Amino acid sequence: MEAVETPTTIIKRRKILPGFGITFGFMMLYLSLIMLIPVSTIFIKTVGIKWDEFWNIVTNERVMHSYKLSFSTSFIAALIDLVCGLLVAWVLVRYNFPFKKIIDAFVDLPFALPTAIAGISLTAVFAPDGWIGRYLSAIGINIIFTELGIIVALAFVGLPFVIRTVQPVLQDFDREVEEAAATLNANRFQILTRIIFPGIRPALITGTTLAFARALGEYGSIIFISGNIPLKTEITPVLIMSKLEQYDYSGATAIAIVMLLTSFILLFTINLIQWWNTRHK
Amino acid sequence: MAIDYTIPTQRKISSLTEPAFVKWILSAAAIIFLSAFLVLPLIVIFSEAFHFGINAYFDSITNSEALSAIKLTLTAALFSITFNLIFSISAAWAITKFEFRGKNLILTILDLPLTISPVISGMTFVLLFGSQSFWGPILAGMGIKVIFAVPGIILATTFVTLPYIVRELIPHMKELGKEEEEAALSLGANGWQIFFKVTLPNIKWSLLYGIILCNARAMGEFGAVSVVSGHIRGYTNTLPLHIEILYNEYNFAGAFAISTLLTLLAIITLFIKTFISTKD
């Protein structure tokens, strides 16, 4: 028994909070089994493909078209999320209106709703006889089975990323800085563009990048709304799926590795932005 | 010198907020956008589901294929939540209570399933355990089938839902620090006592929050499960896969009827989530 509590005994005890070995070990084992070994099989499989064959697969017309389509639709969808997400986040944080709490809860619907259901319900809403689609088809705009349908579904699944990344930053935004600017005779436009916008810019970029990354990989909602027409509305994940269904595992792997590397780069970018952001705070 | 306070004060009020009509227009735009984009698709699910009346609806959700899909969905969710729950608590404990090298790398890896396409996630297990793989024939020789069978569905679901609980726990446990646990330790508590009596009561809401998010995602997962399931009716069909099959057979009312089950789950999830966020 120790009679006296000295700072050294406290420090000594601090080191021996139990459970490091078992929790760390289990974490590494689990990550390896569930994630690292499965993901590494894609790289191992890629190494087994000859370079010529690999190049032929990924530069095939149908594959190239799917890459272009996936990137362009995801990019446009992410931009829509950026604008609409910023609007919704701003309104939810700064203004008051009835049912605000319920509306706020519903923002997460695209996270909680299974993507297959999002796909069939958006298809029903935007079909030529659907609740919104009928008005659009009256003016000659077709949504389903076109690129527009893909963009609508991708914007749907990515929307909460922008809102939920920007909202807490706006919430914590120091109103005193705005007040200080106001006492220095800044007008509202100057405050918005010089103070608020730079403050939420990192969150906006992170949220939009997350929405973009999510859109690139999206599968469930797209297969119902796009029609999956090769060289027209076939996105990359759908193409990978059709290769897998034909047991063309090399083809699927080669196409997938390009997508996977893109995901890694995006993930790295997000972390870089967050790191940069915490350093400059 | 006399200082005129009135002008800055007026200035301050007008430049701290937008004019009323701008507020009104922005709020209306946001509400109209969210209604058209989020609420309409939600209403359409229920309206289509009851297209042929209430009897057809109940028949769609209680036939034997639907029931076996419900059973498999619940099984996959139960297993993947249990696995990820144990993992998340271990990982959060190791990451927030101790210092070690490579922590940032692990934090990045934890987010991987969120950025990888679900199709690719499912594909990794096909490459690992499929008939063309190294392990597939060995396991098949032992009578174990992973791909196009239930274990594959559980693995794929566990993979895609891995980040949800741990991502809620880590920030919360980091914020709580470790003083309370150290105090308990110095009073003679052992590891289990510290966890159950000190840590768990503190993190219970974020833990529950993570579990309901994980559950919603597990029950609704489509892409990854689609790759590994083989779409065998009444055997490897989860609810989302069952929806796809019915839809592709032009049985739209049936597809939407099954959809209402998962949609209700999603709505309940959102309400629990809102309730928990007021607790924290």
Image (cartoon, rainbow, N blue to C red):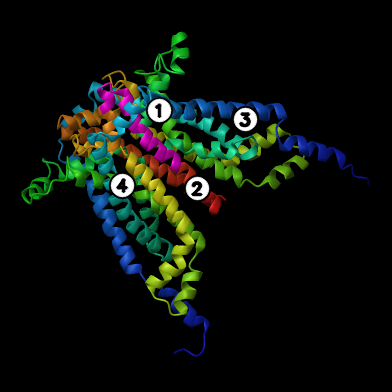
The residue where tag 1 is placed is B45
Magenta stretch bounds:
B246-268
Q: Chain of mark 1?
A: B
Q: Mark 2, mark 4: which one is toward the viewer? A: 4
Decide which of tag 3 and tag 1 comes sooner along the chain: 3
The residue where tag 2 is placed is A276
The residue where tag 4 is placed is B77
Task: Identify which residue is drawn at 69% across, 32% down.
Answer: A189
Q: Mark 3, mark 2: which one is toward the viewer? A: 3
Residue type for callout 4: Ala
Which is the main secondary structure of the residues drawn in magenta?
helix
Is there one chain holding both mark 2 and mark 1? no
Q: Mark 2, mark 1: which one is toward the viewer? A: 1
Q: Secondary structure at mark 3?
A: helix
Q: Chain of mark 4?
A: B
Is there one chain holding both mark 1 and mark 4? yes
Coordinates of residue A89 in the picture (x, y in percent): 56, 37
Residue type for callout 1: Ile
Residue type for callout 3: Ser
Coordinates of residue B86 in the picture (x, y in percent): 33, 59
Q: Mark 1, mark 4: which one is toward the viewer? A: 1
Camera sees residue A257: no
